[in-house]
Amino acid sequence: MANRRTTHDPHQFINTADHRRQLQLAVQVALPANAHVLARNFARSSASSYWLLMLDQPAGQAPRFLTLRIADHTLWLANHDQLAITWQAGDFQTVQQTLRAQLTPAALQHYSFSLTTIDIVTLRLILHLEQHQLIWLVQLSPTIAKAYKNQQLDLQADFLSAKLLLGNMNNSSLQLVPVNQPLFQQRLGQYFGRNLLFSQFTSHRLLRLLPTNQWIRPLLQVLPPTPQLTTQLAAAYGTDFVRVSVEAIRQQAQVSMAN
Protein backbone atom coordinates (compact mmCIF):
# COMPACT_ATOMS: atom_id res chain seq x y z
CA MET A 1 0.00 0.00 0.00
CA ALA A 2 1.45 3.35 -1.01
CA ASN A 3 1.25 5.92 1.75
CA ARG A 4 1.34 9.15 -0.18
CA ARG A 5 2.84 12.17 1.51
CA THR A 6 1.49 15.51 0.32
CA THR A 7 3.32 17.90 2.62
CA HIS A 8 6.84 18.05 4.00
CA ASP A 9 8.63 19.60 6.93
CA PRO A 10 9.92 22.95 5.57
CA HIS A 11 13.27 22.19 7.19
CA GLN A 12 13.56 19.02 5.12
CA PHE A 13 13.24 18.60 1.40
CA ILE A 14 11.67 21.45 -0.56
CA ASN A 15 11.23 20.86 -4.27
CA THR A 16 13.47 23.68 -5.44
CA ALA A 17 16.24 23.81 -8.02
CA ASP A 18 18.85 23.99 -5.25
CA HIS A 19 17.59 20.86 -3.51
CA ARG A 20 17.39 19.04 -6.83
CA ARG A 21 21.03 19.94 -7.49
CA GLN A 22 22.00 18.62 -4.05
CA LEU A 23 20.19 15.36 -4.67
CA GLN A 24 21.73 15.03 -8.13
CA LEU A 25 25.20 15.54 -6.66
CA ALA A 26 24.50 12.90 -3.99
CA VAL A 27 23.42 10.42 -6.67
CA GLN A 28 26.36 11.10 -8.96
CA VAL A 29 28.89 10.77 -6.14
CA ALA A 30 27.34 7.47 -5.04
CA LEU A 31 27.25 5.85 -8.48
CA PRO A 32 29.81 3.14 -9.24
CA ALA A 33 32.37 3.91 -11.92
CA ASN A 34 30.54 1.92 -14.61
CA ALA A 35 27.23 3.82 -14.28
CA HIS A 36 26.12 7.29 -15.30
CA VAL A 37 22.84 9.20 -15.38
CA LEU A 38 21.19 9.16 -18.80
CA ALA A 39 17.96 10.90 -17.74
CA ARG A 40 16.07 11.92 -14.59
CA ASN A 41 12.79 13.43 -13.53
CA PHE A 42 11.38 14.80 -10.28
CA ALA A 43 7.85 14.54 -8.93
CA ARG A 44 6.13 17.88 -8.45
CA SER A 45 4.15 17.10 -5.31
CA SER A 46 6.46 14.82 -3.36
CA ALA A 47 10.11 14.09 -2.67
CA SER A 48 10.22 11.36 -5.30
CA SER A 49 12.73 11.28 -8.12
CA TYR A 50 13.47 8.79 -10.89
CA TRP A 51 16.86 8.19 -12.49
CA LEU A 52 17.63 6.30 -15.67
CA LEU A 53 21.14 4.92 -15.40
CA MET A 54 23.23 3.55 -18.23
CA LEU A 55 25.80 0.89 -17.37
CA ASP A 56 29.02 0.62 -19.34
CA GLN A 57 29.40 -2.73 -21.11
CA PRO A 58 32.32 -4.44 -22.86
CA ALA A 59 32.62 -3.61 -26.54
CA GLY A 60 30.10 -5.43 -28.68
CA GLN A 61 27.60 -6.03 -25.89
CA ALA A 62 24.17 -4.41 -25.81
CA PRO A 63 23.81 -1.43 -23.47
CA ARG A 64 22.18 -2.08 -20.11
CA PHE A 65 20.02 0.35 -18.19
CA LEU A 66 18.65 0.65 -14.68
CA THR A 67 15.75 2.60 -13.21
CA LEU A 68 16.48 4.08 -9.78
CA ARG A 69 13.66 5.47 -7.65
CA ILE A 70 14.39 7.65 -4.61
CA ALA A 71 11.27 8.50 -2.61
CA ASP A 72 9.87 9.04 0.87
CA HIS A 73 6.94 6.66 0.28
CA THR A 74 6.55 3.22 -1.23
CA LEU A 75 5.72 2.74 -4.90
CA TRP A 76 2.12 1.78 -5.61
CA LEU A 77 3.17 -0.63 -8.39
CA ALA A 78 3.89 -4.25 -7.48
CA ASN A 79 6.32 -6.33 -9.55
CA HIS A 80 7.94 -3.19 -10.90
CA ASP A 81 11.38 -3.23 -12.49
CA GLN A 82 13.10 -0.54 -10.41
CA LEU A 83 15.68 -0.29 -7.67
CA ALA A 84 13.70 1.62 -5.05
CA ILE A 85 15.46 3.59 -2.31
CA THR A 86 13.52 5.14 0.59
CA TRP A 87 14.97 8.31 2.05
CA GLN A 88 14.22 10.90 4.69
CA ALA A 89 13.50 13.85 2.43
CA GLY A 90 16.35 16.34 2.54
CA ASP A 91 18.92 14.03 4.16
CA PHE A 92 21.35 14.07 1.26
CA GLN A 93 24.28 12.56 3.14
CA THR A 94 22.33 9.49 4.25
CA VAL A 95 20.78 8.89 0.84
CA GLN A 96 24.27 9.03 -0.68
CA GLN A 97 25.49 6.43 1.82
CA THR A 98 22.42 4.25 1.18
CA LEU A 99 22.97 4.38 -2.56
CA ARG A 100 26.61 3.37 -2.22
CA ALA A 101 25.57 0.40 -0.10
CA GLN A 102 22.74 -0.63 -2.45
CA LEU A 103 24.42 -0.17 -5.84
CA THR A 104 26.50 -3.34 -5.62
CA PRO A 105 27.58 -5.32 -8.70
CA ALA A 106 24.95 -7.94 -7.80
CA ALA A 107 22.21 -5.30 -7.55
CA LEU A 108 23.25 -3.71 -10.84
CA GLN A 109 23.04 -7.10 -12.53
CA HIS A 110 19.69 -7.93 -10.93
CA TYR A 111 17.87 -4.67 -11.64
CA SER A 112 19.42 -3.67 -14.96
CA PHE A 113 17.87 -4.52 -18.30
CA SER A 114 18.69 -4.41 -21.99
CA LEU A 115 16.28 -3.58 -24.80
CA THR A 116 15.74 -5.91 -27.73
CA THR A 117 14.95 -4.88 -31.29
CA ILE A 118 11.26 -5.51 -30.55
CA ASP A 119 11.50 -3.23 -27.51
CA ILE A 120 13.01 -0.51 -29.67
CA VAL A 121 10.33 -0.72 -32.37
CA THR A 122 7.64 -0.81 -29.68
CA LEU A 123 8.96 2.34 -28.05
CA ARG A 124 9.15 4.01 -31.47
CA LEU A 125 5.51 3.05 -32.06
CA ILE A 126 4.48 4.56 -28.72
CA LEU A 127 6.17 7.85 -29.63
CA HIS A 128 4.74 7.76 -33.16
CA LEU A 129 1.22 7.32 -31.80
CA GLU A 130 1.73 10.17 -29.34
CA GLN A 131 2.70 12.44 -32.22
CA HIS A 132 -0.76 11.69 -33.59
CA GLN A 133 -2.39 12.44 -30.21
CA LEU A 134 -2.93 8.75 -29.42
CA ILE A 135 -2.00 6.92 -26.21
CA TRP A 136 -2.60 3.56 -24.55
CA LEU A 137 -4.98 3.16 -21.62
CA VAL A 138 -5.98 0.31 -19.31
CA GLN A 139 -9.28 -0.06 -17.49
CA LEU A 140 -8.66 -0.74 -13.82
CA SER A 141 -10.75 -2.83 -11.48
CA PRO A 142 -13.25 -0.75 -9.42
CA THR A 143 -11.27 -1.41 -6.21
CA ILE A 144 -7.94 -0.17 -7.57
CA ALA A 145 -9.48 2.77 -9.42
CA LYS A 146 -11.44 3.96 -6.37
CA ALA A 147 -8.43 3.66 -4.06
CA TYR A 148 -6.29 5.79 -6.37
CA LYS A 149 -2.70 4.94 -5.40
CA ASN A 150 -3.51 3.55 -1.96
CA GLN A 151 -4.19 0.14 -3.54
CA GLN A 152 -1.30 -1.59 -5.24
CA LEU A 153 -1.46 -2.31 -8.95
CA ASP A 154 0.28 -5.59 -9.71
CA LEU A 155 1.95 -5.25 -13.09
CA GLN A 156 1.76 -8.98 -13.67
CA ALA A 157 -1.67 -9.95 -12.36
CA ASP A 158 -3.78 -6.76 -12.41
CA PHE A 159 -2.21 -5.01 -15.38
CA LEU A 160 -2.15 -7.99 -17.72
CA SER A 161 -5.79 -8.82 -17.01
CA ALA A 162 -6.97 -5.22 -17.51
CA LYS A 163 -8.72 -4.15 -20.69
CA LEU A 164 -6.27 -2.45 -23.07
CA LEU A 165 -7.45 0.50 -25.13
CA LEU A 166 -5.99 2.88 -27.70
CA GLY A 167 -7.45 6.36 -27.43
CA ASN A 168 -7.22 10.10 -27.79
CA MET A 169 -4.51 11.67 -25.66
CA ASN A 170 -6.56 14.73 -24.71
CA ASN A 171 -10.03 13.19 -24.42
CA SER A 172 -10.13 9.74 -22.89
CA SER A 173 -13.78 9.20 -23.81
CA LEU A 174 -13.13 9.84 -27.50
CA GLN A 175 -12.19 7.13 -29.99
CA LEU A 176 -11.44 4.31 -27.53
CA VAL A 177 -10.42 1.20 -29.46
CA PRO A 178 -10.11 -2.14 -27.59
CA VAL A 179 -6.90 -3.98 -28.44
CA ASN A 180 -6.26 -7.60 -27.52
CA GLN A 181 -2.53 -8.24 -27.85
CA PRO A 182 -1.13 -9.90 -24.66
CA LEU A 183 2.53 -9.70 -25.70
CA PHE A 184 2.25 -5.97 -26.40
CA GLN A 185 0.37 -5.42 -23.14
CA GLN A 186 3.06 -7.31 -21.25
CA ARG A 187 5.69 -4.99 -22.69
CA LEU A 188 3.63 -1.93 -21.76
CA GLY A 189 3.58 -3.20 -18.18
CA GLN A 190 7.35 -3.60 -18.21
CA TYR A 191 7.87 -0.08 -19.54
CA PHE A 192 5.46 1.30 -16.94
CA GLY A 193 7.41 -0.52 -14.22
CA ARG A 194 10.64 1.01 -15.54
CA ASN A 195 9.22 4.57 -15.62
CA LEU A 196 9.37 4.66 -19.42
CA LEU A 197 5.64 5.35 -19.17
CA PHE A 198 3.88 7.44 -16.54
CA SER A 199 0.24 7.31 -15.57
CA GLN A 200 -2.72 9.60 -15.07
CA PHE A 201 -6.06 8.57 -13.61
CA THR A 202 -9.16 9.53 -15.52
CA SER A 203 -12.88 8.78 -15.59
CA HIS A 204 -14.48 5.37 -16.17
CA ARG A 205 -11.67 3.65 -14.22
CA LEU A 206 -9.17 4.41 -16.97
CA LEU A 207 -5.45 4.78 -16.42
CA ARG A 208 -3.73 6.79 -19.13
CA LEU A 209 -0.20 5.66 -20.02
CA LEU A 210 1.91 8.44 -21.46
CA PRO A 211 5.48 8.08 -22.71
CA THR A 212 8.20 9.54 -20.53
CA ASN A 213 9.74 11.37 -23.46
CA GLN A 214 12.72 12.69 -21.51
CA TRP A 215 13.71 9.04 -20.94
CA ILE A 216 12.65 7.30 -24.14
CA ARG A 217 14.30 9.77 -26.52
CA PRO A 218 17.77 9.56 -24.89
CA LEU A 219 17.39 5.77 -24.87
CA LEU A 220 16.63 5.63 -28.58
CA GLN A 221 19.61 7.86 -29.32
CA VAL A 222 22.03 5.27 -27.90
CA LEU A 223 20.22 2.25 -29.37
CA PRO A 224 20.46 0.93 -32.96
CA PRO A 225 18.11 2.25 -35.66
CA THR A 226 15.13 0.11 -36.64
CA PRO A 227 14.31 0.26 -40.36
CA GLN A 228 11.13 -1.35 -41.69
CA LEU A 229 9.22 -0.46 -38.54
CA THR A 230 5.83 -1.62 -39.83
CA THR A 231 7.21 -4.99 -40.96
CA GLN A 232 8.86 -5.62 -37.60
CA LEU A 233 5.74 -4.61 -35.68
CA ALA A 234 3.64 -6.98 -37.78
CA ALA A 235 6.11 -9.81 -37.19
CA ALA A 236 6.02 -9.20 -33.43
CA TYR A 237 2.35 -8.45 -32.82
CA GLY A 238 0.48 -9.47 -35.98
CA THR A 239 -0.97 -7.62 -38.95
CA ASP A 240 -4.28 -6.98 -37.16
CA PHE A 241 -2.45 -5.04 -34.45
CA VAL A 242 -0.70 -2.88 -37.06
CA ARG A 243 -3.99 -2.37 -38.90
CA VAL A 244 -5.68 -1.11 -35.72
CA SER A 245 -2.85 1.37 -35.10
CA VAL A 246 -2.90 2.66 -38.68
CA GLU A 247 -6.69 3.02 -38.63
CA ALA A 248 -6.58 4.88 -35.30
CA ILE A 249 -4.07 7.34 -36.77
CA ARG A 250 -6.30 7.84 -39.82
CA GLN A 251 -9.37 8.49 -37.67
CA GLN A 252 -7.44 10.84 -35.44
CA ALA A 253 -6.32 12.81 -38.48
CA GLN A 254 -9.96 13.18 -39.52
CA VAL A 255 -10.91 14.40 -36.05
CA SER A 256 -8.10 16.94 -36.11
CA MET A 257 -9.14 18.22 -39.54
CA ALA A 258 -12.76 18.54 -38.39
CA ASN A 259 -11.69 20.64 -35.45
Image: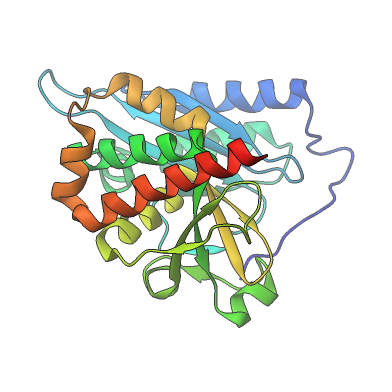
Q: Residue furthest front?
A: 258
- x 76%, y 20%: residue: 18
Please tell me how many numbered marks the rendered image carries: 0
Colour scheme shown: rainbow
Image check: 151 left or right of 52? right
Q: Residue furthest left?
A: 60
Picture coordinates of residue 32, whole percent (x, y):
37, 26
Image check: 186 left or right of 10? left
Of the pair 108 and 45, the residue shown nearer to us: 45
The answer to whether residue 116 is visible is: no
Q: Residue furthest bottom?
A: 143
Of the pair 137 and 175, the residue shown nearer to us: 175
Against 93, residue 182 (above or below) is: below
For the C terminus, the quadrant is: top right
Against 144, residue 149 (above or below) is: above
Of the pair 43 and 182, the residue shown nearer to us: 182
For the N terminus, the quadrant is: bottom right
Picture coordinates of residue 227, whole percent (x, y):
18, 26
Against 236, residue 129 (above or below) is: above
- x 36%, y 27%: residue: 219
Of the pair 72 and 17, the residue shown nearer to us: 17
Q: Quadrant of residue 258?
A: top right
Q: Quadrant of residue 49?
A: top right
The answer to whether residue 143 is visible is: yes
- x 30%, y 42%: residue: 122
- x 67%, y 61%: residue: 202
Against 132, residue 246 (above or below) is: below
Picture coordinates of residue 55, whole percent (x, y):
30, 27
Picture coordinates of residue 69, whole percent (x, y):
53, 44
Image check: 17 left or right of 255? right
